[in-house]
Amino acid sequence: MSGGPTVGAILTLNAGSSSLKLAIFDLVASGALLPWRRGELRQDGAAQRFRLRDADGVTIVNEVWSEARFDASLGHLLARIDGELAGRRLIGIGHRVVHGGAGHRMPEEVTPELLALLGELAELAPLHVPHNLAPIREIALARPDMRQVVCFDTAFHRTIPTVATRFALPREFESRGIRRYGFHGLSYEYVARRLAVLSPRLYAGRVIAAHLGNGASLCALKGGESIDTTMGFTALDGLVMGTRCGALDPGALLHLMRWEGLSVDEAERLLYTRSGLLGLSGISNDMRVLLESGEPAAAEAVDVFIHRIVREAGALASILGGLDGLVFTAGIGENAPEIRARVCERLGWLGLRLDETANADGAEIISAPDSAVEVRVIATDEEAMIAEHVRDLPAA
Ligand code: ADP
């Protein structure tokens, strides 16, 4: 194994509403983290499907577990992970927590006090935070001596200046936490760290990172720090997403609630689960399906998706005062050359020129040599970012 003997293993857990992603990394003496296992537990009808891949991406476990929900499978999961460690010592578990509010802007070690505080924060992201916290609580009970670290998806955006985080509401609302936070922070932090290695010039410059997955957002990076982003108080704002609407005139919501009698729960379901690419197309939230479909509504959904990226990228280029680099990441950003090409073509006014062959081949750099903006594709790895935080946070 490169980097010397294994010091121990770090487990990362990313628990959502219908799936739990996990990864195990070896921490070696040099400080490097080497991926060992990646997997997920996903709702599969009335049961759970557990899949695990080795370091080469080969599926080594594909099982159905009878527990109806993944929170009920946690004991089972931990026992399986113990088995997978093959003699390694688990030295810490890192968790992704979607919202840290205004008070939690760095990774933190879990204590009973922190868990109580985070429970209160669940109000800010009720669809996500309770799911994120469930395994932390269970592990704290089952293995009280295990070191646990929480990593907030909002934390990387702590560098955004106040002028960009404020809503133009009366001032008292800010102190109640009603402000823009930004999300996908672990992904952007990973991308920024990769950029520092791959291209120090771009890292030091003005870059837009485009995390285009089921959730989608853009982040303006200056000198590797976030200075603005398209998501706001929640992960609902900004771009069109798989099933989320993105930016919406709040007046439309008021209208729907007043004149169409939508309850709060119905409005929440509409905006989070029935909108975006799925709502626009009436076909699917999956970009692959839409790109292959011959239906006009599918094509229009993709058009709106692109339009909003181009619009927001223009706004962020303005905030940055110009643009040196554009980085695509996440499921669509990493795998859909057609989407990248359409975005880049529309951003040609910034002096951006795509190398079509490099783009089609999924090369690391997909801009032409004479492009004023360097365009890169970087595969994100939120799990690796969490593991780095567990490694780097000094023990309490
Ligand atoms: P999540 O936000 O759930 O982590 P991902 O980053 O995995 O999402 O991205 C999922 C999205 O990526 C889906 O819309 C899927 O259709 C899209 N995607 C994955 N591979 C491709 C591809 N080859 N072409 C187009 N879209 C793709």
Image (spheres, rainbow, N blue to C red):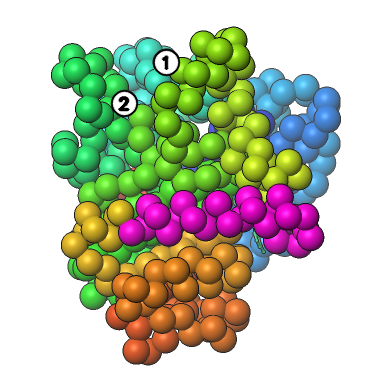
- Secondary structure beneath label 2: loop
- Marks 1/2 in contact by CB < 8 Å: the verdict is no
- Using a 10 Å C-alpha cutoff, classify the residue at mark 2 as few (fewer than 14 neighbours), some (14 to 19) or many (20 or more): many
Kind of residue sitting beneath label 2 = Gly
Magenta-drawn stretch contains 299: yes
Q: Check mark 1 vs ligand 1: CB closer than 8 Å? yes or no.
A: no
In the picture provided, is 369 more to the left or to the right than 274?
left
Front residue (pair 31, 373):
373
In magenta, the rendered stretch is 288-314
- Which residue is drawn at the image coordinates 83% and 30% (left, top)? 45
Looking at the image, is 352 positioned above or below residue 69? below
What residue did someone put label 2 on?
101
- Which residue is drawn at the image coordinates 28% and 60% (left, top)? 317
Q: Position of residue 199 (x, y in %)?
A: 30, 75
Q: Where is residue 54 in the image (x, y as percent from the top left)?
A: 66, 58
- Which residue is drawn at the image coordinates 16% and 36% (left, top)? 162
Between disc 1 and disc 2, whose residue precedes? Answer: 2
Front residue (pair 28, 248):
248
Q: Check mark 2 vs ligand 1: CB closer than 8 Å? yes or no.
A: no
What residue did someone put label 1 on?
123
Q: Where is residue 332 in the image (x, y as percent from the top left)?
A: 58, 59
Kind of residue sitting beneath label 1 = Glu
Q: Quadrant of ligand 1?
A: bottom right
- Which residue is drawn at the image coordinates 60% and 81% (left, top)? 361
Magenta: main secondary structure equals: helix
Looking at the image, is 385 positioned above or below residue 99? below
- Secondary structure beneath label 1: helix
